[in-house]
Every structure is written in structure tokens, then in C-alpha cells.
Amino acid sequence: MTKTIEQIDEHLNKLLGRLVRTVNAIDKARKARRRLLSNARSGVAQSVEPSAVNRVVAGSSPAAGAIEETKPIPPAIVKTEYSEAELDIPAFMRRGLAVQNAADQAAAQAIKAEVEEKAKLKARGRIAKMKAKQAGELRAMPLSGKAALAKINGF
């Protein structure tokens, strides 16, 4: 089976595209791994034992990525409890509770009314379209000439 030069070039371009994507994915994974290791060393994560850090196999280069053993790195510490001062709303953002409730209720009613009105208009349009379809008006040819003038003038 003989292939043309164009077919071979097309195949090479496909393979090179896959290769580039694969190399980029490998670089991305290595950077993520390096970032996690540096976070573990700097104390962002919980204390990591020295044995938890991956060791490179003897006789191979670190760039080759050969790993002898892998232990999971503990997740970063997540703060779940906050003091009252951290949750306090700044003074410039506070509003009176009565004013807030009245203003919020008025805004909520306005929004609700707008949504209901929009739904009613949508339903009216849908009903008008169904009636026109049943009457056959959607399939009727457009008026022209004297018939169009009569329709415009209301005769």
C-alpha cells in the first residue's frame, strides 16, 4: 500500500498535534506536583513527614519523573471557625433592620410583579399563536394588490 506525500504529511501533523498536547499535559501535571510539594514544605498544608515527600529512583534524572514511592500529601488546612470580629459587617455597609426589611420587601414585590407580567405577556403571545395556527392564518399567503389595500383601509 503506497501513501502519497500529502497523506504522510497529514498523518505527521496529527501526531505532532497529539505530541504537543501530551507534552503540555505532562508539564502541567509536573507544575501542579511541584506547587503541592512547595506548599507542603512551606507549611501551608498540615505537617508532612519527610517520608511523605516523593523520592526519585536512584540512577535516573529528576526530569525523567521516575518515582519510587508516592504517599498522598495531606490537604491544606481549611479554616472552619471564625471569630465575631471577622464576620462583623463594616459600618459603612450596615443598614437599619427596619429600613432593610421595608426596602427589601418593596424590591422583592417589584421584581415579582415584573416576572408575573412577563409570564402573562408570554402566555398571551403563545395563545394568540395557537389561535392563528388553528384558524390557518399562519399558512395563508400574504395579501397583495387590492386585497392588501382593503385590509389596510379596514374594508
Image (spheres, grey):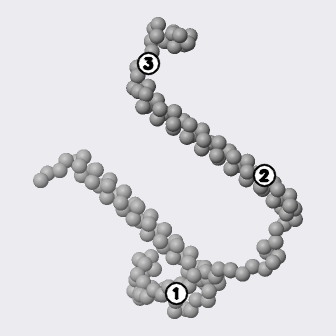
| Residue drawn at point x = 34 percent, y = 58 percent | 16
- Mark 3 is surrounded, within 10 Å at the Cα level, by few (under 14), some (14 to 19) or many (20 or more) other residues, namely few
| Residue drawn at point x = 56 percent, y = 10 percent | 153
Q: What element carries label 2?
A: helix
The quarter of the displayed image where residue 120 is located = top right
For marks 1 and 3, give the CA distance: 78 Å
| Disc with the residue nearer the chain's start (2 vs 1) | 1
Q: Report if residue 103 is visible in the image.
A: yes
The reply to whether callout 1 and callout 3 are in contact (CB within 8 Å) is: no
Residue topped by disc 3: 142
The residue type indicated by label 2 comes to Ala
In the rendered image, residue 98, in percent from the top left (x then y), is placed at 86, 61
| Disc with the residue nearer the chain's start (1 vs 3) | 1
Q: Is mark 3 on a helix, strand or loop?
A: loop
Left or right: 108 as drawn, with respect to 57: right
Residue topped by disc 2: 106
Left or right: 13 as drawn, with respect to 53: left
Q: Which mark is residue 118?
A: none
In the rendered image, residue 119, in percent from the top left (x then y), is placed at 60, 44
Q: Is mark 1 on a helix, strand or loop?
A: loop
Q: Can you tell which of label 2 and label 1 is closer to the viewer?
A: 2
Residue topped by disc 1: 53
Residue at the left extreme of this rendering: 1
- Residue 87, above or below 11: below
Left or right: 60 as drawn, with respect to 7: right
The residue type indicated by label 1 comes to Val
The residue type indicated by label 3 comes to Pro
Left or right: 117 as drawn, with respect to 20: right
Q: Report if residue 138 is visible in the image.
A: no
| Disc with the residue nearer the chain's start (2 vs 3) | 2
